[in-house]
Amino acid sequence: LTFLKILGQADPAQATSRLEDVLEVARGLGDDSLVAEVLNRLAWFALSTGDRSRSRALHDGAVDAARKGGEYLPLMMALNGGCAPEEDQAEALALATARNDAIGRYMVLSHLASDALDAGDPKAARAYFEEALPIIERASPGGDANLFVSLADTRLLDGDHASARDLYSRGLETARRYIDERHATYAIVGLAACAEALGESILGATLFGVVERELAESGFALEEVDRRIRAESESRLRASLGDEAFEAARSVGRSLERDQATEIALGRRQLASE
């Protein structure tokens, strides 16, 4: 399952296919906790590709199986799974707190924060993320790409573009280190938006071209907040550059190799036109 989780960060379709085979085995064994773990992972993969209705159905199945299994960790993880409603997340947070499970609390706080962002409440999201940040910094000095990128989103929406750019950069570096293509792409969305906000229009349009290619190749879907950031920033770039220059820069981004794109996004390499 650990291998399939890692595979799902780069190729969710292949990981889903393999997990469905594992699910049949788990059901054949009659292991409710294992069934819950597999359903929960499938729910996250469905959410990552934008299929929210399937994700919610898989989530509900994971919670039912975990309750039957009666073990703490599968239940806490399932309650905090893909498309989990607020009441399930609250129960997961209470369980993790009662067990003094710092990492469990971190996971739920991060999920609550992401949901607050998608709901258009960056102030609540930032509070959750900033409560979660010291937990993961103590447990994992390298940090977590999801947290860096999501906290950066809150700062971008607050107009703190320099701070947001630093966090997006940390998120991109971390995501590349752990072969997490989903959060690497989210980080590039943010870096493109920061470039646009800071007057670096050609860079912003180029990075949005990188995003377009990455989404097409991976099959991942942007979360609601990232879709809004992308749409609004691209609209401003098109207006400032004009259609022809905007599309030319985006075309350059689509043609960049992944390593090139990463170095340019992190400011370690200039565009050929600069």
Image: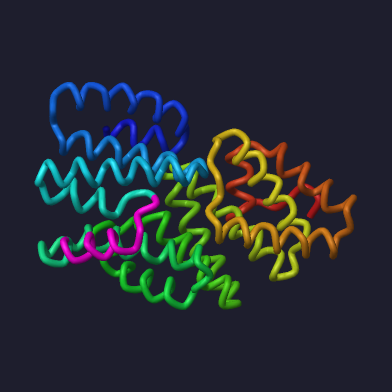
Name the side, left or right, on which 250 lies relative to 173: right
Q: Nearer the viewer, residue 46 or 243?
A: 46
Q: Quadrant of residue 165 in the image?
A: bottom right
| Residue 16: x %, y % from top left | 40, 30
Image quadrant containing the C terminus: bottom right
Residues 77 and 149: in front is 77
Residue 84 sits inside the magenta stretch: yes
Q: Is residue 20 magenta?
A: no
Residue in front for this viewpoint, 143 or 75: 75
**Would residue 176 be seen by someone viewing this image from the given angle?**
no
At 71% from the left edge and 44% from the top edge, which residue is drawn? 253
Figure quadrant of the N terminus: top left
Tell me residue 189's x, y (percent): 61, 55
Magenta highlight: main SS: helix
Residue plotted at (36% across, 24% down): 18
Residue bounds of the magenta highlight: 83-95
Most foreground residue, 22 or 266: 22
* Tally of numbered discs: 0
Displayed quadrant of residue 217: top right
Left/right placement of residue 95 relative to residue 83 reads left
**Residue 244 in view of the camera:** yes
Which residue appears at 64% of the width and 65% of the height? 194
For residue 7, above or below residue 79: above
